[in-house]
Image: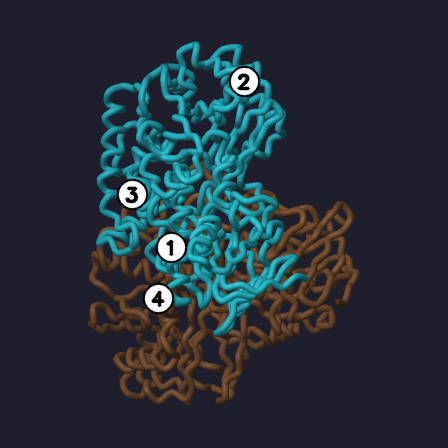
Chain colours: A cyan, B brown
Amino acid sequence: METIQTDIVIIGAGYAGIAAAKKLLEKGKDFVVVEARDRIGGRTHTQTLDCGATIDVGAQWIGPTQHHIWKWVKETNTETYDTYDSGKNILSWKNKISTYKGTIPKIDPISLIDLGLAIDKINKLCKQIPLEAPWSHPKAKEFDSITLHSWIEKNMFTKKAKHLFNIGVETVFAAESHEISLLHALFYCHSGDNMEALISIANGAQQTLLKGGTHGMLQKVALPFQDKIYLNNPVLKITQDENIVVVETENVIVKAKKCIATLPPTLLSTIKFHPILPQRKAQLIQRVPMGAAMKCFCIYDTPFWRKLGFSGQIVSDTSPVKVTFDCTDAVTDKGVLLVFVEGNNARNFIELPEAVRKEKVLSELVKYFGNEAKNIIEYKDKCWTEEEFSRGCYAGNMPTGVLTQFGKSLREPFMHVHFAGTETAMRWNGYMDGAIESGFRAVDEVLKTLS
Amino acid sequence: METIQTDIVIIGAGYAGIAAAKKLLEKGKDFVVVEARDRIGGRTHTQTLDCGATIDVGAQWIGPTQHHIWKWVKETNTETYDTYDSGKNILSWKNKISTYKGTIPKIDPISLIDLGLAIDKINKLCKQIPLEAPWSHPKAKEFDSITLHSWIEKNMFTKKAKHLFNIGVETVFAAESHEISLLHALFYCHSGDNMEALISIANGAQQTLLKGGTHGMLQKVALPFQDKIYLNNPVLKITQDENIVVVETENVIVKAKKCIATLPPTLLSTIKFHPILPQRKAQLIQRVPMGAAMKCFCIYDTPFWRKLGFSGQIVSDTSPVKVTFDCTDAVTDKGVLLVFVEGNNARNFIELPEAVRKEKVLSELVKYFGNEAKNIIEYKDKCWTEEEFSRGCYAGNMPTGVLTQFGKSLREPFMHVHFAGTETAMRWNGYMDGAIESGFRAVDEVLKTLS
């Protein structure tokens, strides 16, 4: 067993951990990173397929107000391109197919007004939630006592609009509206500008893609300190006293002054703490379950739907193909259609054999794009609930009662251990940008205590 | 490191684990029990105080329809006694003190009707929930989409009745009504007969106490196989293949054909599984947070309140002394007043220094019982959120959306590992009786697969 002595040990080499390391390097500090997986990236993961195309089976998009990650894009000279957003979008509703342009499907005027008003209301409400302390809003307890579902039932009136709103919610949270607290939903929307930004391509969270995927950029960021990253080292134990924190993994023991833990809150429970975590933190990490997100990629020689006048975007009321995007690879120009499966649909779908999943996705796509949709050159899907070191995606969501009772414990350090990870972010919580923010913030905390 | 070969390894020596072991012994099977703590009992724990009185800082009462535990009472010749329930109960509301008899406080007629009707409604609704499959109820999804709080807001009309109802909820769930799903609440009430039974002494869950506490009986039950119980052995790892399950603790390795894991769902995340848990189970255990229950015991030479005409029961709108019981020790006759602190109140209260907690409890009691309440001979309190191997009490509660999406995974075995613990019980879920049921049921499952 190798023993390493350093000043700061970072747990996790996802965007949060790499951000923390980058900042520590810039400050000339001594650190190491221990990572459970055999790769950096955490909930981002770029894969190169047999046909040469790259896909991001984890997080992939960048929105215009995600300033941290844009800075990295520029620093690393990473090429970006806009998500394809021209042509007709498809709405499939009770087996009737129609087309529309923009973010909001063309539906009957009453439902359209209902939907528009609901999004407006959420946008206005969410602006009031203080990002650094959502629990301090005068109505925090009230908003944290009901599910987002209950809010929808009270504030929306047409079945169709409710259904479409819920599809939006599923796509944003990888969970259903009845699984999350209204307060958490409002905080999350404000954290990412507003609900409209979260569901949009243009000016929204799905606007920009990285050429070659997210991994290339992260690798460039991590290059100057790659020798300090210990892969294949899931942390088993954290022992602390007044002077030292000792992080034990399966293969190394790291002795440090400070620790930055970037795991999602729920995964902190896999680590044995000595002394044990304070009771409130221990109960918090029982209460931030991960969403369930699955990405199904259908790879074609070309994005054939474009020449048929389609954008590649589908919104449908029938699983598995409820929400799709054109994620055509800008390097090889292979046509990539991305199908999102979310929440319980994801947990159910991943339990089917892969051949059945592929068949089900394709037979749906044929309905919209004709027989050409059958001619895929590769199919690849990924459900993050299966990953031992994520156990869900995109992020940890908060059920009712959590943010008001436990929110303060999210970022509160425990002796020498400071907490980062996108779930602790104030801006773009749940996104890569939020992960970077959290890593920087944890470093600021640590440097203050060290100086 | 000692290696043990056996047929069945049981994890946990609480009521569930001891029940499983007892049944396996009766069937002539070979087994061992590994237990994290230095004692058996799990979330039950009898302590003998300096004055000689015994108190149960964990579970303590038995209700009349808890047939499993009554059978043990008889088999072990354990003496029982009725919870003291004579004299005046106290209601403290907005600093006004009044007295009443029975379970329901004497309040204005409108509030009284409101409260009575709400309890009636819950009692009727809960009867419809199938105990073996709550998710199969026709309205399961609807009931699982809202919090119990939302149901209260919709079905109750007076502030006072709502407040009293919520105190009842806190006492039953060790959580607030906005933290739990209506479906979970209904299931839980049905599981323990109905809501009235859960909040009552006479004919209810608080009817009977064990002389000398719960530990004496459990010890008698465990006596025939006490050499098979390995204390101080928190489980770190469970490895399985087709033929074998290997349970590794800090000190022993147990190789067995089958395993019965009796930990609360959330604590399963502290064990490393190889292969890893199926995705649905892995996400389930992120979603069953433990309640927060704290018991504060004030020990007096005699139960002096009785001679003043009081039952010792208080219901109040002010923390920490919101709900109290007379738990006078039947062996020493020392007067024991038990103060429950629940949910967030418990998490806040335990963070105060012990001397302050004691002072706060006593100064409240003086308001009700006069200066005699100051003359305690001992004060003892316990918050289960601080216990590494429980991390809350009484049991795991389900937020919205959990029972319908994950309920089936609660008891579903994973290869050779079967799951018990009171959270998996159909009757008296969350109680000692439910724990016993779950241990027996897991043994039935295991024996079926072994034969």
Q: Is residue B428 visible?
A: no
Residue B403 is situated, as x and y percent measured from the top left of the image, at 48, 45
- Residue carrying label 2: A300
* Chain containing the residue with disc 2: A
Kind of residue sitting beneath label 3: His
Q: Amino acid at mark 4?
A: Asn
Screen quadrant of the N terminus of chain B? bottom right
Which residue corresponds to mark 4?
A: B345
Residue identifier under label 3: A190
> Which dot, 2 or 3, sits closer to the camera?
2
Q: Residues within 10 Å of mark 2 (few under 14, many from 20)?
A: many
Where B329 sits versus B75, above or below? below
Q: Which residue is mark 1?
A: A441
Chain letter belonging to callout 3 = A
Asked if marks 2 and 1 touch (Cβ < 8 Å), the reply is no
Disc 4 crowd, CA 10 A, few/some/many (<14, 14-19, 20+): many
Could you tell me which secondary element the residue under label 1 belongs to?
helix
Q: Nearer the viewer, mark 2 or mark 1?
A: 1
x, y percent for residue B292? 43, 63
Which quadrant of the figure has residue A47? top right
x 57%, y 46%: residue: B281
Q: Categorize mark 3 by other alpha carbons within 10 Å: few (<14), some (14-19), many (20+).
A: many
Is A143 displayed left or right of B433 in the figure? left
Q: Earlier in the sequence, mark 2 or mark 3?
A: 3
Q: Is residue B92 visible?
A: yes
